[in-house]
Amino acid sequence: MIETGIVGASGYSGEVLVRLLAKHPRVRLTTLAARSLAGRSLAEAMPSMADIPGDLSFIGADPAALAASSVEVFFLALPHGVASEFALPLVEAGKVVIDLSADFRLHDAALYREAYGADHPAPERLASTPYVIPELAAPGWEAASLIACPGCYPTSVQLPLVPLLRTGCIESRDLVINSVSGVSGAGRKATEFYSYCEREGSVTAYGIPRHRHAVEIEEQLGHAAKEAVTVQFVPHLVPMVRGIQTTIIARAAVSAAEAREVLRQHYTDTPFVRLLPAGKFPDTRAVAHTNRCDLSLTHDPRTGHFILNSAIDNLLKGASGQAIQILNGKFGWPATDGLL
Amino acid sequence: MIETGIVGASGYSGEVLVRLLAKHPRVRLTTLAARSLAGRSLAEAMPSMADIPGDLSFIGADPAALAASSVEVFFLALPHGVASEFALPLVEAGKVVIDLSADFRLHDAALYREAYGADHPAPERLASTPYVIPELAAPGWEAASLIACPGCYPTSVQLPLVPLLRTGCIESRDLVINSVSGVSGAGRKATEFYSYCEREGSVTAYGIPRHRHAVEIEEQLGHAAKEAVTVQFVPHLVPMVRGIQTTIIARAAVSAAEAREVLRQHYTDTPFVRLLPAGKFPDTRAVAHTNRCDLSLTHDPRTGHFILNSAIDNLLKGASGQAIQILNGKFGWPATDGLL
Amino acid sequence: MIETGIVGASGYSGEVLVRLLAKHPRVRLTTLAARSLAGRSLAEAMPSMADIPGDLSFIGADPAALAASSVEVFFLALPHGVASEFALPLVEAGKVVIDLSADFRLHDAALYREAYGADHPAPERLASTPYVIPELAAPGWEAASLIACPGCYPTSVQLPLVPLLRTGCIESRDLVINSVSGVSGAGRKATEFYSYCEREGSVTAYGIPRHRHAVEIEEQLGHAAKEAVTVQFVPHLVPMVRGIQTTIIARAAVSAAEAREVLRQHYTDTPFVRLLPAGKFPDTRAVAHTNRCDLSLTHDPRTGHFILNSAIDNLLKGASGQAIQILNGKFGWPATDGLL
Amino acid sequence: MIETGIVGASGYSGEVLVRLLAKHPRVRLTTLAARSLAGRSLAEAMPSMADIPGDLSFIGADPAALAASSVEVFFLALPHGVASEFALPLVEAGKVVIDLSADFRLHDAALYREAYGADHPAPERLASTPYVIPELAAPGWEAASLIACPGCYPTSVQLPLVPLLRTGCIESRDLVINSVSGVSGAGRKATEFYSYCEREGSVTAYGIPRHRHAVEIEEQLGHAAKEAVTVQFVPHLVPMVRGIQTTIIARAAVSAAEAREVLRQHYTDTPFVRLLPAGKFPDTRAVAHTNRCDLSLTHDPRTGHFILNSAIDNLLKGASGQAIQILNGKFGWPATDGLL
């Protein structure tokens, strides 16, 4: 049993991570560090976790103390900018660090500055930190001690697009991406905008013309296409708690049968990504509370487009579930351990 | 006081229409005809209408009897194919007919056959029946006795696009339209798919690659652009009752300031369409239970696109509210009569 | 046309009141006073009101200035404690004041102190200010200048109970009242508890053992029963925006037929209260966006109880709709004016 | 690894049971029998289960074939009346049968006839079949081969009441029970009443004056009180998918401190039932997707009542989670196995 800890567990994805680690058959969750919850028991601070055995309590989040602890693997569920304050000393101390923040997702420090409005604290680490969607990452990432776990919008976009771009099944220009997200994607909120009465019955676009995640999406799609890619990305909020549905319009470069075959083969041996039969479309409800991504590819002969749809649970495949998948891959365990 | 009647009032938009006519200061609602509800009182058949005064009861829907009645204006809230069975004899008998069905929305009988899978029963009437979104229709439509009232997706698409296409502010090629709709758009349903437990938390695309409404949208946009227009239209269902939010990606042909000015001027004197200030985006909640359409236009200099967003209440501006607006326009009454 | 104004219009019931007055055929809404919104236009401060004609803007809320204005009727949509600062000078200046706050709902100053934790600023006005649920209030209230408009829970409780208590159809002891409320009952909120992600899927009791509204309910039921009444009142929050459903368990003192006949007769000539046929139960959805209250009475011969159910829209019959009903009654206008 | 099977897995609780067994560390799920799904693969028939490994497919539900299979433990997720057709031959064949239907929940055949309108097919089995809420059932139930798993309303009612009735902390007369349930409690539905547009925003009582579950509740509370108990039980539907919140008004016979101590002690060593601190109230959201029941006890000195609140997830502690708890208890495994 490997000893694990979470730093910054107070948000919704942190909460999901607590449960995933508590039920994982190969690890023990021994450390919960969160400044805002220090000193409180798990059951009291997070009532929905009250059935988790053990007497877990939150401690303060001190990098040096955590580096000196017996925990082998740390998950960072921290805001960008803060995560790197923990990631570097923990890696230095020999820990494995799976970072759910945005701090090591970009490989280009200039893009980081553009997207996050501040200089990156450790730009020299950016290029060497693997960006791991396990179904897409280049083999060898398992050797790394610090691993960037991608988030919700980028995961829902890359799972359908990357295999098709790599194989030239679609053109890399004129990609139009519309995503709708459940409200938990914004994290815990105490604002009127995120109040129940304002979100119920409300659908609205936001963050355009250039959402932060578009920067990350473009960098990764560029790697896949082996050329610079510019996308039109429009995120929306819809009245549900969990889930992301992404609809992508891409110019077809091959037949629908060929493109479907590329996706089918790419995802053959993966338990969490599934290409739906023609005429079926991904539904956020079908993937909610699972680590799955459902995909569909539809050809429109009138426009010459493929319409690609994907659905994930933003707190699982879009955050904490993906982090557990990374853990399983890193240690060579079965992909579904702790994730059913 | 003009005497009005509704044929086929049993659906959600029919229900909304009952209330709108009941509170309209210039009309009396005297006739409710619906096969499935014949003989039942309004309060019993539609509990939410129980405060409407008068002793309204449903009668059977017989074209000849309705043609012989004293009602001056009929609203048809019937399925396509059925509406024309009523529209033609009622118009013949000198009635004004405002048709909320799809029967007279297309001007080309071949397109009707393609979209609805049957020959149109009165193709000779198609070209002469005005298609009236009041803010966009060519002047003179008020003289017609039979008027087609457009529905929810097409209204949400045309209000932002038509003024821009007419003035050449955008290119007419490569239009990508993503819409999300509340569940009432599908009408009253008794299926597992539309059950609460299946729709709650569910976002999914449907009806692709070519939804029926895309045919209507393309015909109308073609009139505006004065050339054939092909669009990529992807509708989605989201977990709310009312509302449509549409996001359109269009190639800019002028500056954002020029395009915004075109929209601003076009909608200056209209109470129901509003261009939001830059940085604000239409929200279905803000237009719910109103006849309004909110619009936004955002320029992305990286892609050269305008991102156009619109939001309406599908049962009001997308159906019954628009029908009342047509009534007000036809009789020269103030646009907001009965619509506040 | 009578000139009207709203003081404190920034909450959800204030917003509803704006629309009700804007569409009322016998009044003009000329004044919107709200400290937090002073200087902003209606359309900008409340996007959902953007179709309301006129150039309404918010002004600051200054009692003296309002007292000097030409407005004849003021609606106070203010927090308790604040409302009386406006009510007294406005009444003094000859205005009609319809107060939606709790300030003049209790007749006993000691109860006010117990419920609201502060001395009442004008205890001498309490006994003489009529408490008006129009269907229940004693005739003659129309002569008053200051009128207390009861709120959501008390209205949903009194409409079924008061006629039965007055006529001895039920015993006044052992009343158990369970109410569930939509989230808008708590007003505009910027707290984590009221955030979408926390309220969705959440049902919970609150405010027990003694909610403020229980004090008001007991005082009014005591008047009806002509003896002191103690109730067990348990309010709950449920995941919807609008609506209150109340379930009351009362000891039957007469047959179900007699009790139903008392309710039927009491509400015969009222457009807004409806006794449902046996076997049908009030549904918040059927009364949403209306000023109605639906009622049912069910007898359980095993327990000797009547089960009374009621449903209202908390923002209409439970707040602003009731205020308009009071306006109509005060001026002798038809009850449904502006309320369909 | 014990081999398990489910008969009648097509409903919502069947679906949940599939996942619970698939992830349970001590069992293999090898058999899924459901008439309506025979021949279909799990992933195709239940898209949300597509990540469950193995090539599970549904077979027809034939009692004789199932009795001859190698499966050791069967879960019956069948309608009442049908379950006994399977339970008896399977038990006869030496299988363990955990029955989630109502067929063996009542001990009195006359009550069964009253509640279900038909004679019980095996009345001689009723008295000897243990009714097992694991936290409440008398020791020794583990020896039985056929075990009745109680459902949602009765579980939410008995967990707070039974320890208090057994110890005389409350009186057994005048119990008033109000429950609200999420829509999944009604199972998969294809009716207009259960459609999204009808349930959203809808709260309504139903099934009064005497719901079927009241019969079961009264029989069990009678065992606890050692005298006949009559309750007033009012169930309601609210717009959420999962969850039951129950509010009980009971006459206090001891102090609040004593009653709280009884509950605290009774549930000390149970991972799934938790008494909340005074001033906190159970919330369906906090127990959703867990097997927990949260409880609160509040004393009202004015009325002499205890107000008892409980919340569970109807598909877990109110159905399939409880069935797994029974499995764990039957085989002496840790209570939380497969339930975190």
Image (tube, coloured by chain):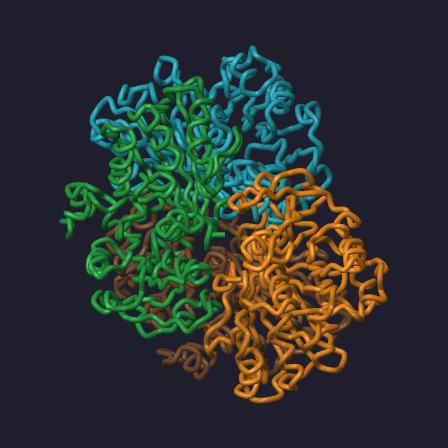
Chain colours: A cyan, B green, C orange, D brown
Q: Where does residue A45 sit, x and y in percent of width and height?
A: 67, 44
Q: Residue at x 72, y 73 (%)?
A: C220
Rendered position, C108 above or below D73: below
Q: Residue at x 38, y 48 (%)?
A: B329
Q: Where does residue B272 sit, x and y in percent of width and height?
A: 46, 43
Rendered position, A332 above or below D202: above
Q: Where does residue C256 sit, x and y in percent of width and height?
A: 54, 86
**Residue closest to the eye, B201 or A138:** B201
Q: Where does residue C95 sit, x and y in percent of width and height?
A: 74, 59
The picture quadrant where one finds residue C183 is: bottom right
Q: From this viewpoint, is residue D330 visible? A: no
Q: Residue at x 64, y 19 (%)?
A: A89
**Residue closest to the eye, B163 or B49:** B163
Quadrant holding the N terminus of chain B = bottom left
Q: Is residue C64 left or right of residue D52?
A: right
Residue found at the far top of this picture: A124
**Residue closest to the eye, A162 or B260:** B260
Q: Is residue A227 left or right of residue B87?
A: right
> How many numbered discs, if any?
0
The picture quadrant where one finds residue B235 is: top left
Q: Is residue C109 left or right of residue A69?
A: right
